[in-house]
Image (cartoon, helix red, strand yellow):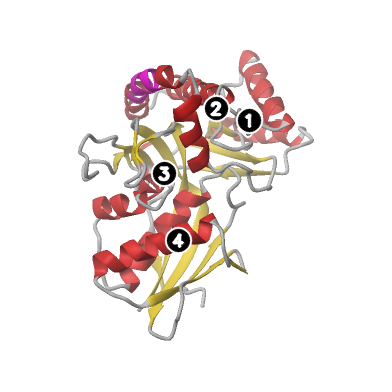
Amino acid sequence: MKATAIANANIALIKYWGKRDEKLILPNNGSVSLTLDKLNTITTVEFDKKYDKDILILDDQELKEGEELEKAIKHLDLIREISGIKELAKVVSKNNFPTAAGLASSASGFTALSLAGTKAAGKDLDQKELSILARRSGSGSAARSCVGGFVEWLKGGKEDGTDSYAVQIAPPNHWPELRMLTTIVSTVKKKVSSTAGMDLTVKTSPMYKAWLAAAAEDLEKMRKGVLNKDFKSVGKTAESNCLNMHATMITTHPSLIYWMPTTLEIIHSVLSWRDQGLECYFTIDAGPQVKIICLEKDVPELEKKLKNIKGVKKIIICKPGGGPRLTDNHLF
């Protein structure tokens, strides 16, 4: 009863921020993301009677307590429930990028856990079923990592959440020239998680209702822009949507300011480079890392410029990636 899965992280072009149902993790708005080929999680799950508790080892460290362990055990309970098994599990998971630092590690992590866990439990889920399961992990964006390429997470309207899952807008090879440069400006775990942050925003930000209205319009523009491969429209819409979301965070009580000095320096640089004719756009999730949307032809110039910014620790060049997959290369 052992299986291993690899799942890619996704970065939202139209953000998800806020839930209409806390327990089922149902979003207040639909979202659109790009699954990335270079940011991934590999997870091995084994259910066995020899275990007297659920064990989680993340990036070579066994978690003894805390929110991450609680979420993982809750998710294993869901897998046991739908699979009809009772055995406890050992889970070993590794990310090839910083964990809990604004790079969607929870999305790839819970997608990998969902696929490996259900397979180890003897259950084969289709893409829709896997997306619904991954969504319930406590990281709603995991719903989107269950699909490759350009992805829309449907808001849905049903109370039971059966119509809220991810669908593919276009496959990875639809737009092979598109790139996302992920800049690492900090590897420190953020103080306020996305889950806690969005709950606080929904309750206290006076700008939240305006954000929802704008996000619904942005989603339509983004879907159309992706299908038409309209780079300017995709970039402008993603950048605007990102700033709108962060405006709700800043006006939350107490304020949620995830940006670092280097984050702001990259933002200003992107705006300046664009004024000079180098077309690129930025997007930022709940963290300090800036992702730059560009075309393949401009990657060398952008990489050169980013390396001249002192606070940039690493640049990961990503292109559209595929959905989760099983592998025989177990971690234990």
Q: Name the residue under label 3.
A: 141
Amino acid type of the residue tagged 4 in the rendering: Ala
Q: Name the residue under label 2.
A: 249
Q: Are marks 1 and 4 in contact (CB under 8 Å)?
A: no
Q: Are marks 4 and 3 in contact (CB under 8 Å)?
A: no
Q: Do the residues labelled 1 and 3 touch (CB within 8 Å)?
A: no
Amino acid type of the residue tagged 2 in the rendering: Met
**Residue at image location 49% in from the left, 29% down from the top:** 201
Q: Name the residue under label 1.
A: 257
**Residue at image location 52% in from the left, 55% down from the top:** 67
Image disc number at residue 72: 4
Mark 2 nearby-residue class (10 Å; few <14, some 14–19, many ≥20): many
Amino acid type of the residue tagged 3 in the rendering: Ser
Q: Is residue 313 visible?
A: yes
Which stretch did the figure color magenta? 212-219
Q: Do the residues labelled 2 and 1 touch (CB within 8 Å)?
A: yes
Marked residue nearer the N-terminal end (4 or 3): 4
Label 1 sits on a secondary structure element that is: loop
Distance (Cα) linking label 1 and label 4: 27 Å
Distance (Cα) linking label 1 and label 3: 20 Å
Relative to 76, is 180 on the left or the right? Answer: right
